[in-house]
Amino acid sequence: MNILISDPIDEQAVRELKKFFNVLRKGEEAKADIVIVRSRTVIDRAYVNKAKNLKIIIRAGVGLDNIRDIEYCRKKGIKIEHTPEASSVAVAELTLGHMIAIARTIPVTAEGRRKCKWPREDLVGFELCGKTLGIIGLGRIGKEVAKRAESFGMIILACDPYITNSKHKMVKLQNLLKQSDIISLHVPLNEKTRCLLDKKEFRMMKKGSVIINTSRGDVINEDELIRNLKSGKISFAGLDVYSERLIKNSSLKKMDNVILTPHIGAQTIEAKERIGKAIVEKVKNFQKEFERK
Ligand code: NAD
């Protein structure tokens, strides 16, 4: 079978795949039986039409939003798989990392230190203990975030219309927005979650609340986010995901109340290894299944 590894994955996994399969170069979609992508490669109708032999798409990681036409893939008999469990801990730890960095002004402090400034008296942070954390989307990552935040003494509220039974206090989105000191997003991007936090939702938030987004940029109306960060309604944002447009926004670069990380949620040694192993297993299982037919 021919495999196209379209986005970078764990090197050990690549070596393992090369032992058993013919690994193609980018641009050779037409010959591929299996395509492996992360979040960069966009698979749309045109891609599928070009990849005439394609039988399975494996998304390394979670979130199928870059596979634009899932229905069309299904119609063509193309299977879609992902490695949903592999990165939950990594993303949850980064989420907590953003919270702590914001609470203790770590980026400003560290930057000041590099410039030999030591403005200790001005840098008074706040404690996470006792603060209310509103988790939007209590799935794999949301639950891992809740577990860690609880150990910090935070009060957890969660909103997830698809979960009926949870040990956490489940509330409606509007109540979560009104009550949370920190709001953290862990929903998939789809037509229902696009701009889930829009003008109306920002109006409901507490003055001075913090937003952390490690899910997908488009779940927030980014123009509203910037407006609210400028007005102080939102005191701080920690973002691992955002649109290209937001990055090009020059006013954002001048803002001290935003921490941007470049989509590194799953970028840990452990998560990459786990994702790599899961991919190799899925490819081998698929081949076995295919040979049996
Ligand atoms: P998951 O499917 O386990 O959890 C998502 C949860 O969101 C589900 O429980 C679902 O019921 C809930 N949900 C759906 N629509 C909702 C809505 N309108 N309001 C509230 N809740 C809603 O997925 P996961 O593994 O926890 O991952 C969540 C997302 O995180 C992924 O879809 C992906 O976009 C993102 N992610 C980012 C990185 C990164 O590098 N930053 C890495 C992995 C995943």
Image (cartoon, helix red, strand yellow):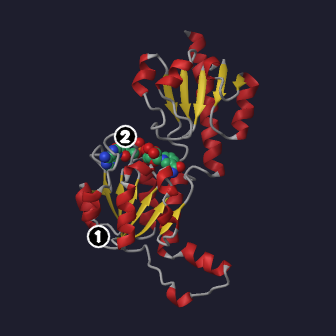
Secondary structure, mark 1, is: loop
Left or right, 20 with reference to 250: right
The residue at which mark 2 appears reads as: 190
User: In the drawing, what numbered circle is on residue 253?
Assistant: none
In the rendered image, residue 277, in percent from the top left (x then y), is placed at 64, 37
The residue at which mark 1 appears reads as: 206
Mark positioned earlier in the residue sequence (1 or 2): 2
> Where 99 falls versus 1 (above or below)?
below
Can residue 88 be seen in the rendering of this structure?
Answer: no
Disc 1 packing (10 Å; few <14; some 14–19; many ≥20) = some
- Circles 1, 2 touching at the beta carbon (< 8 Å): no
Nearer to the camera, 228 or 105? 228
In the rendered image, residue 212, in percent from the top left (x then y), is placed at 43, 61
Locate residue 169: give its quadrant. Answer: bottom left
Q: Amino acid at mark 2?
A: Asn
> Where 1 falls versus 12 (above or below)?
above
